[in-house]
Image (cartoon, rainbow, N blue to C red):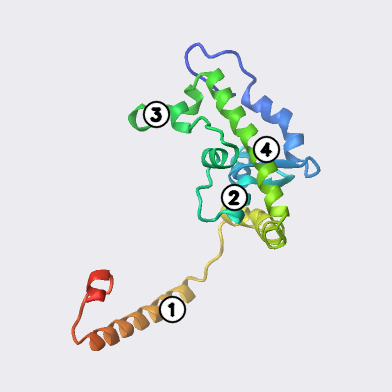
Amino acid sequence: LAHDYPGAPAQVKLERALELLRPWLERADCRKVGEDVKLAMHLFANHGIALAGCVHDTLLESYVLEVHERHELGALAQRHCGWTTLAAEEVVGKGAGRIPFSSVEAGRATEYAAEKADCALALHDLLFRKIEADEKLNFVYGKIEMPVLPVLYRMERNGVLLDKDKLGFQSHELGKEILDKERRAYEAAGQPFNLGSPKQIGE
C-alpha cells in the first residue's frame, strides 16, 4: 500500500484498503495478536479506525517474562525462535541514506511486513505458553498489563489533566527539602562537595 517510487506496481488505494479492513479491525469478537498493540491503535486512530479485539501483545508478554532483556521483535525472534529477521535499517537504510517506507520496493516491503506478522504470531505461541504456566505471571499479564493497555492508549491520545498549582507547590517543597539535605551532607563531610560525583562521595 501507498508505495510511490518511480515504476511502483499498481496497488489498492490506501483508503479502499482501510475501508475493506475496517469491519474486521473494529470488531472486538475478531481476536487479534499484535506486537506493540498500543502503537497500532494510535496508527489506526490516525485514519479514523478504532482497533478492537487485541487480546495479546508480544511486547507486553516479553516485558512480563524478561523485563531486563531487549523487547523489539527482531531480538525476540532471535532469542526465542532462533530466527534472524530483516532489520528496519536493511529495508529503509539509515542516516543520510534513509528512505521513506513508501519508497521501498513493494516486494521487499512485503517480505519485511509479512515476516513481522509471522514473527508476532510465532512469538505469542511461545511466550504466552510460558506465562500461562506461571500463576503469578499470568495474573500480571492478564489482570494488569493487558487491561491497562487501552487506558494508557486513551491517556496518550487525549492527554491528562494536571493541577499546575499543586505541582508547583510540590516542586517548591521538594526543592526546600533537597537544599536541607545537601546542607546536612556538607556539614557531615565538613565541607561542600559535588553530591552528583560518585568519586567525591566515595572520598
State whether residue 142 appears in this view: yes
Which residue is pictured at 32% across the width and 85% down the height? Answer: 180
> Which of the 4 quarters of the picture holds residue 43?
top right
Disc number for residue 169: 1
Residue placed furthest toward the top: 7
Amino acid marked by disc 2: Ser
> Which of the 4 quarters of the picture holds residue 172?
bottom left
Tell me the CA gap for discs 2 and 3: 29 Å
* Sooner in the amino-acid sequence: mark 2 or mark 3: 2
Which residue is pictured at 73% across the width and 53% down the height? Answer: 132
Q: Secondary structure at mark 4?
A: helix
**In the displayed structure, does residue 12 sit left or right of residue 183?**
right
Marks 3, 4: nearer the viewer: 4
Disc number for residue 98: 3
Decide: is 161 above or below 3: below
Residue at image mark 2: 62
* Sooner in the amino-acid sequence: mark 3 or mark 1: 3
* Sooner in the amino-acid sequence: mark 3 or mark 4: 3
Q: Secondary structure at mark 1?
A: helix
Amino acid marked by disc 4: Leu
Do the residues under discs 1 and 2 have CB atoms within 8 angstroms? no
Residue at image mark 4: 121
Marks 1, 4: nearer the viewer: 4
Do the residues under discs 4 and 2 have CB atoms within 8 angstroms? no
